């Protein structure tokens, strides 16, 4: 009979120990599930943030390309304006020269008249004076 009682006590002890082990295993499993869920949530947030970073990186790259294009366009505009300014200065100088030439041409009849008048006076003075023979 001692053998039977020992077997029952050992059986009960094994059952209690097995129950405690099962209880701890279930607790560990639920903790692992909670941690796994929390890690999955954090992974999702990290993925969402990474997508946002990739999107922002793409937008920054596009902005950089746009800015370089606008800078190149404005730089080209400034160059063309400088060239146009030089051309305008040359045209202004040419126009001033042309205006001076036009003034001279406009005074030509006056000058020609004065020369003709001077020549006529010289001829009339010669005719008044006898030519020595």
Image: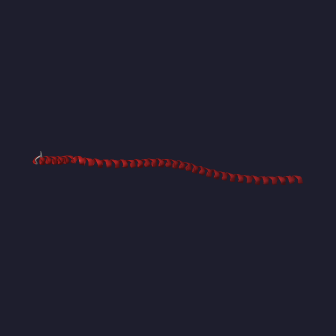
| Front residue of 131 and 127 | 131
Residue 58 x/y as whole percent:
53, 47
Asked whether 63 or 126 is in front, the reply is 126
Q: Quadrant of the C terminus?
A: top left
Q: Position of residue 45 (x, y in %)?
A: 59, 51
Residue at 39 percent of width and 47 percent of height: 83
Q: Residue at x 85, y 52 (%)?
A: 7
Query: Left or right of 39: which side holds 21?
Result: right
Q: Is residue 104 left or right of residue 74?
A: left
Residue 1 visible here: no
Q: How is the image coloured?
A: secondary structure
- The one nearer the camera, 74 or 110, is 110
Residue 1: percent from the left, percent from the top?
89, 53
Residue 12's spot in the image, x, y percent? Answer: 81, 53
Of residues 41 and 15, which is closer to you in this image?
41
Residue drawn 12% across the image and 48% down it? 125
Question: Would you say residue 72 is visible in this rendering?
Answer: yes
97 on left or right of 26: left
Number of numbered discs present?
0
Residue found at the very far top of the displayed protein: 133
Which residue occupies 76% across, 53% down?
A: 21
Q: Residue furthest front?
A: 133
């Amino acid at each position: 009979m001692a053998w039977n009682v020992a077997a029952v006590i050992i059986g009960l002890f094994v059952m209690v120990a097995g129950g405690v082990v099962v209880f701890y295993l279930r607790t560990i499993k639920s903790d692992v599930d909670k941690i796994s869920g929390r890690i999955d949530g954090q992974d999702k947030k990290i993925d969402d943030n990474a997508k946002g970073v990739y999107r922002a990186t793409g937008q920054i790259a596009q902005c950089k390309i746009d800015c370089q294009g606008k800078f190149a366009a404005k730089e080209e505009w400034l160059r063309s304006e400088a060239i146009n300014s030089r051309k305008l200065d040359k045209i202004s100088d040419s126009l001033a020269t042309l205006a001076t030439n036009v003034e001279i041409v406009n005074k030509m009849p006056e000058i020609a008249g004065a020369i003709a008048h001077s020549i006529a006076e010289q001829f009339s003075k010669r005719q008044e004076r006898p030519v020595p023979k």
